[in-house]
Image: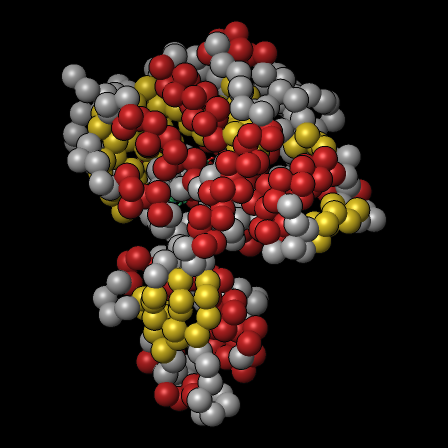
Amino acid sequence: MREQILVTGGAGFIGTHLCAALLERGAHVTVVDNLSAGRLPALAELQQCDRFRLVEHDITVPLDWEAPLTAVMHLASPIGPAYVRDHPVSTLMAGSAGTVNALEIARRHRARIVLVSSAEVYGDPAVQPQPETYTGNTDPVGPMSGYQEAKRFLEAMATAYRREHGVNTGIVRPFNVYGPGMLPSDRRVVAAFVVKALAGQELVVNGPDAVRSLCYIDDFVAGLIAMMESDAPGPVNLGAGEGTEIGDLAALVVSTVGSGTVRTGASAETGGASRCPDITLARETLGWKPTTSLVHGIRATLDGMRTVIEAQATVRFDVPSAWTTLLPPAPELQCRAVSVGAALRWLTATHPVLAPRLLSPQGQLVPWTNVYLGQDNVRDLKGLDTVLTGEVTLTALPAMAGG
Ligand SMILES: NC(=O)c1ccc[n+]([C@@H]2O[C@H](COP(=O)([O-])OP(=O)(O)OC[C@H]3O[C@@H](n4cnc5c(N)ncnc54)[C@H](O)[C@@H]3O)[C@@H](O)[C@H]2O)c1
């Protein structure tokens, strides 16, 4: 029988690469994703395969899954420091209720389940590098607690299901994963540096000695699949065993892109926690180690990012007539943008008078519900990161006209 694999969060950056690798080996793959992080072009490619299925569902809600299953890969979670700091509730819900629901599916089907945690469980580590036995240095009420405690709960609940219900669980702790498929709107360090360098801007490095473990996506996916094939309970660190100093990363990105400059900021404290994994356990239990050089990985990421940026759409804005009285005569409501968020950011920057209608009181862009893409394509507009290509029209709902 062919493998039947369910991937929660499979529509995201890591998930789409994982699904492509699983389809490549002949598996039937079902993604369960609420598309909150947007819709990546890679998802459309996966949907070309008749062994692939997308179920739009929020994993914090229980899912009755009757079809046979051999494995569950649980990736669904909000991510990104800025996002999870602003949305700690949905982050904790994905890590808690979402994890329980994923574990329940695996329990009912007696399936192997791999749960994707994070190096954030180590917090601001007091030891370098971090072995899995290091219990971390986190603050349950600190700024990153929504994400850190979500992942710590995920690990605790996975362990509880293994001990009490005999579920075949496996926990992995990724460090920074990067590669093609990251969106220009991604604020994480590699994507942010590449975007700045492409725009010929300054890459400001706060704390140039801070170390990140940068693992190329293909290596990471190979580690996930090795974990799926094993019975190891983990947690297992999956990351580059050799750390990269942020200052060196910035210099490499600038030289690879051929534009941009590096400026060293004053405050080392704002550079973020230095983290680097001890990957002995992954080597010994999974026979895994990363093999892609940083130079190759950055080049591939740059190529992927260029493709997305070059394909950016011409976006026209169709705003309610009540708004046009606020604008200069015949305003040019048109721009080139890679994503819904980028287009709306352009609109608020160039026509500040519309900002109160497009920004929440906290200064965040309005959620997707207030804008239509085309006539009836609302589902495709989920998430400000949704990539736009070709020529599109964003239409604000008439209901928002007075807002
Ligand atoms: N990328 C990294 O460097 C990294 C590092 C450490 C841990 N991780 C973990 O790896 C996993 C995947 O990360 P990614 O980089 O692909 O992020 P991503 O944002 O690209 O993908 C996450 C996916 O989960 C979905 N999702 C979020 N909440 C959901 C919910 N309640 N129900 C259903 N779907 C939901 C999103 O729509 C998205 O498609 C996450 O669990 C993340 O915490 C990633």
Q: Is residue 326 visible?
A: no
Q: Which residue lies furthest to the top in this view?
A: 284
Instruction: Indicate left or right for 2 with 391 as reference.
Output: left
Q: Which residue lies furthest to the right in this view?
A: 266
Image: 347 above or below 240: below
Indicate the quadrant containing the C terminus: top left, top right, bottom left or bottom right: bottom left
Q: In which quarter of the image is residue 397?
A: bottom left
Instruction: Indicate left or right for 245 with 314 as reference.
Output: right
| Near-viewer residue (123 or 237) | 237
Q: In which quarter of the image is residue 225?
A: top left
Image: 217 above or below 256: above
Q: Is residue 212 visible?
A: yes
Q: Residue at point 51% right, 53% down?
A: 185
Q: Residue furthest front?
A: 258
Instruction: Indicate left or right for 190 with 51 as reference.
Output: right
Image coordinates of residue 57 in percent, x first then y, are: 29, 46
Image: 386 above or below 292: below
Is the image coloured rainbow, by chain, by secondary structure, or in one colour?
A: secondary structure
Q: Residue at point 74% right, 38% down?
A: 247
Image coordinates of residue 198 in percent, x first then y, are: 59, 51
Image coordinates of residue 23 in percent, x first then y, are: 27, 28
| Near-viewer residue (248 or 379) | 248
Image coordinates of residue 383 in percent, x first then y, are: 40, 56
| Near-viewer residue (382 or 145) | 382
Q: Residue at point 77% right, 41% down?
A: 207
Indicate the quadrant containing the N terminus: top left, top right, bottom left or bottom right: top left
Q: Residue at point 53% right, 16% down?
A: 289
Q: Point out the quarter of the image occupied by ligand 1.
A: top left
